[in-house]
Image: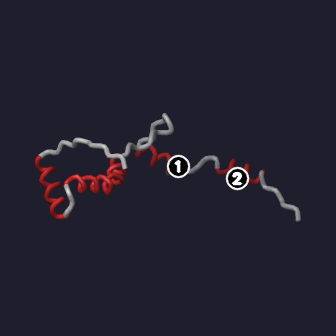
């Protein structure tokens, strides 16, 4: 296994917490930090992941406008029914 040395500056509070955790777990500080990174990395990535980019340049409707719009009756129900009726076909046995 190739090893990379990474100097990691810690403030005094975090350094004390790492020392206490290392003592409680009977691990060296370095091993404790490696384990913490291995266990915590997926959670950190999930929590801090950037949201996916927008797939449209159109801004969403403001909530008040959207509610008003979606409460209106669809005005193309008749045309959709006619289109669906025109596309029906019988399956021959």
State the image coordinates of residue 3 (x, y, percent, origin top left). Answer: 32, 46
Q: Nearer the viewer, residue 3 or 54?
A: 3
Residue 72 shows which numbered tag? 1
Residue 92, picture quadrant:
bottom right
Task: Locate the C terminus and report the quarter of the image it occupies.
Answer: bottom right
Q: Nearer the viewer, residue 3 or 92?
A: 3
- Of tags 1 and 2, the one toward the viewer is 2
Residue 31, picture quadrant:
bottom left
Residue sitting at x 84%, y 61% = 91
Residue sitting at x 49%, y 46% = 69
Residue pointed to by mark 2 = 81
Q: Which of the marked residues, 1 or 2, is nearer the chain's N terminus?
A: 1
Q: Nearer the viewer, residue 59 or 20?
A: 20
Compared with 22, 45 (above or below) is above
State the image coordinates of residue 59 (x, y, percent, origin top left). Answer: 45, 37
State the image coordinates of residue 66 (x, y, percent, origin top left). Answer: 46, 45
């Amino acid at each position: 296994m190739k090893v990379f040395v990474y100097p990691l500056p810690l403030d005094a509070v975090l350094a004390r917490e790492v020392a206490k955790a290392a003592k409680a777990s009977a691990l060296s500080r370095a091993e404790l930090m490696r384990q913490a990174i291995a266990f915590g990395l997926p959670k950190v990535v999930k929590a801090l992941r950037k949201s996916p980019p927008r797939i449209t340049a159109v801004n969403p409707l403001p909530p008040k406008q959207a509610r008003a719009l979606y409460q209106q009756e669809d005005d193309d129900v008749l045309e959709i029914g006619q289109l669906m009726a025109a596309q029906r076909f019988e399956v021959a046995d």
